[in-house]
């Protein structure tokens, strides 16, 4: 099957050919004809299977053929996505696919100045790609109205729920007209996603092209056992000896990403870090340098596990295994995209054996292991607990999904705990007995007359 058989217009087929696409992916084959008929869609496909084109191409055709309801140019299609990088890449794709159509698109997200976005919205936008927080900022400042939206796309919906955006999503839905076409795309179908779909979609067509939480067949997976203190040394050895020119490396923490990036640069490998504490400008520059080949190694936290679409990325390395097994699938899904081959390598120390078992249980398969000569693990080294990890006993029992991802934010270290005053009882939110006694003692000391100095 080719794109010519999906009912797309000549302009879109021309744009697709310019991108070098010949054969549509399974999700594109199933989703495009259904969306063109105006039906709601609930689509599940593993990362890297072409979901963006699956909704962007039919969306562009529908808007181009359908006359605007009003004389002014208003937002008619809204695409909501969880991260800034993903939002920017979706808008780039929409622009590329729609370059032969008279439609305008824009992207809005936080971390950058809002005024240039306001100017672009005032000039008129047909298709808007947005992250939830910045979208609501514009609505609150009355620089944007959603009353003309005809098509809503929630992309990476499971990631948005994991990141705590459910309340923002509900606020956005309340601002939209009731009559609209809804498209929900998700890498996984959790119970939360199904509940969201039940309240959002109208008799949707279900599209599921792969079992949940499995890696693409185009990705070769391999484990290299190594001691924790020799991981960076082994990583540099692999990149240099095998001449990898473009490598995406994942760490668990922002501090770890910064530290590894500095170490790799000292090893003579041009590296940059990307994570949530970086400014949007720094993140954009690092990603652009990586795509253009100026940066050889991009070190990232899980903020980049979804949304990074890098053409022909051949190697992904898990410098540290993720705390949450599902994130492993999303990480390695950055390679092996669009039916290209890719390799995902994990450097696993003795501390991470439990995490590895969890991942293999999720995948329902064992991942091949290969010990690199000269980097054999020392069997006398004992496992150490991973901070914020899942290999600590009974840590995940009784936790919700957000707490499982961020264990350190539960039971006295989350936002509510930070708002407590010093000495305040965590249950009653008033001072405890010991604190009251201490406060009374301090008051008695302060009430004594000051001693005269000789």
Image (tube, rainbow, N blue to C red):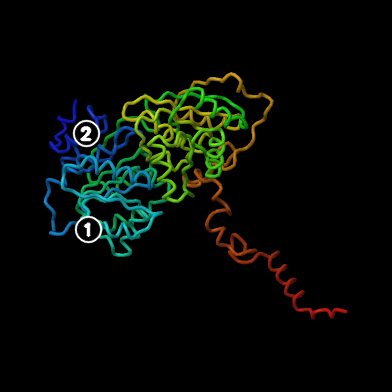
Figure check: 22 above or below 80: above
Q: Is residue 220 above or below residue 80?
A: above
Query: Residue visible at 37% across and 40% down?
Result: 307
Residue placed under numbered mark 2 in the picture: 18
Circle 1 crowding by C-alpha within 10 Å: few under 14, some 14–19, many from 20: few
On the rendered structure, is 198 left or right of 326?
left
Q: Residue at x 75, y 79 (%)?
A: 447
Horizontal side of 297 relative to 34 (left or right) equals: right
Pointer 1 residue: 123
Q: Residue furthest right?
A: 454
Rendering quarter of residue 245: top left
Residue 168: horizontal and vertical position, in percent? 36, 55
Q: Position of residue 207 (x, y in %)?
A: 27, 35
Which quarter of the figure is the N terminus placed in? top left
Whole-percent x and y of residue 167? 38, 55
Q: Position of residue 231 (x, y in %)?
A: 58, 30
Q: Nearer the viewer, residue 75 or 444?
A: 75
Residue 312 occupies which quadrant of the picture? top left
């Amino acid at each position: 099957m080719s794109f010519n058989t999906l009912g797309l217009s000549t302009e879109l087929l021309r744009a697709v050919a310019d991108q070098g696409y010949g054969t549509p992916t399974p999700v594109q084959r199933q989703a495009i004809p259904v969306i063109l008929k105006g039906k709601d869609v609930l689509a599940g496909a593993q990362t890297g299977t072409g979901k963006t084109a699956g909704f962007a191409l039919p969306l562009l055709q529908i808007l181009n053929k359908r006359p605007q309801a009003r004389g002014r140019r208003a937002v008619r299609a809204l695409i909501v996505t969880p991260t800034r990088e993903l939002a920017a890449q979706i808008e780039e794709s929409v622009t590329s696919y729609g370059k032969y159509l008279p439609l305008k698109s824009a992207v809005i997200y936080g971390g950058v100045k809002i005024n240039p976005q306001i100017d672009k919205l005032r000039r008129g936008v047909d298709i808007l790609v947005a992250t939830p927080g910045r979208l609501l900022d514009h609505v609150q400042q009355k620089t944007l109205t959603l009353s003309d939206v005809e098509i809503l796309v929630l992309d990476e919906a499971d990631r948005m729920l994991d990141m705590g955006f459910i309340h923002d999503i509900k606020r956005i839905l309340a601002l939209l007209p009731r009559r609209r076409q809804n498209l929900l795309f998700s890498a996984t179908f959790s119970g939360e996603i199904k509940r969201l779909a039940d309240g959002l979609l109208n008799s949707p067509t279900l599209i599921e092209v792969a079992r949940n939480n499995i890696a693409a067949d185009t990705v070769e997976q391999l484990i290299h056992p190594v001691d924790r203190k020799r991981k960076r040394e082994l990583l540099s050895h692999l990149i240099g000896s095998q001449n990898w020119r473009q490598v995406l490396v994942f760490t668990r923490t922002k501090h770890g990403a910064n530290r590894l990036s500095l170490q790799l640069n000292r090893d003579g490998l041009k590296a940059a870090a990307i994570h949530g504490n970086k400014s949007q400008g720094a993140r954009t520059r690092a990603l652009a340098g990586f795509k253009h080949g100026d940066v050889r190694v991009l070190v990232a936290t899980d903020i980049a596990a979804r949304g990074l679409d890098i053409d022909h990325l051949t190697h992904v390395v898990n410098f540290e295994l993720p705390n949450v097994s599902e994130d492993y699938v999303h990480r390695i899904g950055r390679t092996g995209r669009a039916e290209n081959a890719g390799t995902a390598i994990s450097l696993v120390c003795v501390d991470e054996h439990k995490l590895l078992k969890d991942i293999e249980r999720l995948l329902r398969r064992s991942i091949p292991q290969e010990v690199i000569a000269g980097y054999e693990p020392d069997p006398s080294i004992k496992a150490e607990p991973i901070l914020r990890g899942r290999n600590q006993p009974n840590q995940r029992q009784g936790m919700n999904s957000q707490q499982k991802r961020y264990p350190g934010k539960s039971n006295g270290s989350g936002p509510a705990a930070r708002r407590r005053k010093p000495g305040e009882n965590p249950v009653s939110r008033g001072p405890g007995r010991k604190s009251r006694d201490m406060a009374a003692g301090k008051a008695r000391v302060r009430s004594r007359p000051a001693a005269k100095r000789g």
